Amino acid sequence: MIRLKYFEVYRTAAVILISLAIAFIIISLVSSQPVETIRIFLFEPLSTLSRMGNVVEMAIPLMFTGLSVSLLFKTNMFNLGAEGIFYISGIVAAILAIHLSMNGIMHPIVAIGAGSIVGALLSAIPGYLKAKWNANELVTSLMFNSIFFGIGLYLLNYHLRDAKAFSNVSYKFAETAQLDKIMPGTRLHTGLIIVLVLIVLAHYFMYRTKWGYELRMTGANREFAGYSGMKTAKVIILVHLIAGFIAGMGGSVEVLGMYNRFQWTALPGYGLDGALVAMLAKNNPLSVIGAALFLAYIRIGADLMARLSDVPSEMISIIQAVIILLISAEQFLKFWKNRMLLKEAKLHE
């Protein structure tokens, strides 16, 4: 018998399968070669080393933002500020990558460290507003996303833009600031190692430390946590600092690992995608790895499908919408959970 504690795992798997089934039905209706199109979508990302590398490359920023958002969601903070922090921290790292002269070891460390610290400090603002005045963290975080994007775009246009380039991009980064590649034939960089280490540390922090326990208890019931002697205001500010640090590190790593210039003229979208990764991972740090790889895989598959068949890549939006709808629907498969509860209760009679 399936034990109750595995219910959420099976529920998430059911959500993914239903989403893929709906996508396949639509593909069958619009494609002249539906079988070949589905084959491309499912298996083409594994066809070459370069394409497999593309999946992991796309998963790296999703892991950063997914981890950041999962910590906030675990504290019952519906904060989507990772989007703006990811962008502005990338700008900070780019400034140091352009104007700082250091050796190849310290340069990326300093640039990423600065972006991470800026991300932590900026994330603390909505955290402080929530802890001090109970300001809605969703509203404040979305507001700050627009502010950070505006500041970043101003810096790009008026202080970093390379006038000799034929597009709105920054000057080139110093080679010493760019992250090393770790696999020939791909663009995989040392950011993969950084994020995996960070995920393990976050898991240890959340489930093996006093602060992690306070974080989880505050998310479960803030009033009860306060009555138990926990300083919930400090917990809220602390989790915003940590989440901002991780998102800031993600933006810095992505910029220095994948580009030789800063070239984002719009918010990259990784912060909002991080919310989807966190939902798929059920706010578990270790599960963020699989969730990010899954989302990256279907996106690369959709891109290849658009290039090699007659179905546009926008198909992926349908899958994401269904996933969000079903995961956020509390009643989905609740009848199954109730049956499992009754069975376990009878076993203990």
Image: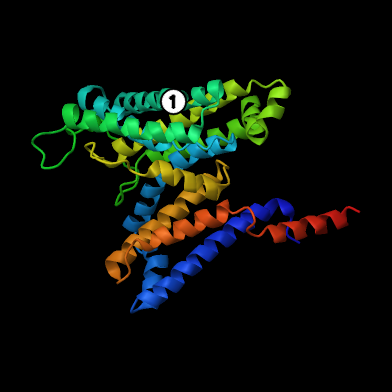
Quadrant of the rendered image containing residue 140: top left
Q: List the single residue furthest toward the left.
A: 164
Position in image of residue 110 (x %, y %)? 33, 23
Q: Which residue is mark 1?
A: 120
Residue at horizontal 40 percent and vertical 72 percent from the top: 27
In the image, residue 95 sits, relative to residue 34, either above or below, namely above
One can see residue 238 in this view: no
Colour treatment of the image: rainbow
In the image, residue 165 sits, relative to residue 239, either above or below, namely below
In the rendered structure, the answer to whether residue 91 lies left or right of residue 116 reads left
One can see residue 199 in this view: yes
In the rendered structure, the answer to whether residue 312 lies left or right of residue 277 reads left
Q: Nearer the viewer, residue 297 or 269?
A: 269
Residue at horizontal 50 percent and vertical 32 percent from the top: 137
Residue at horizontal 59 percent and vertical 37 percent from the top: 74
**Amino acid carrying mark 1 in the image:** Ala
Position in image of residue 48 (x %, y %)? 34, 61
Position in image of residue 203 (x %, y %)? 58, 36
Label 1 residue SS: helix
Q: List the single residue furthest toward the bottom.
A: 32
Quadrant of the rendered image containing residue 43: bottom left
Quadrant where the N terminus is found in the figure: bottom right
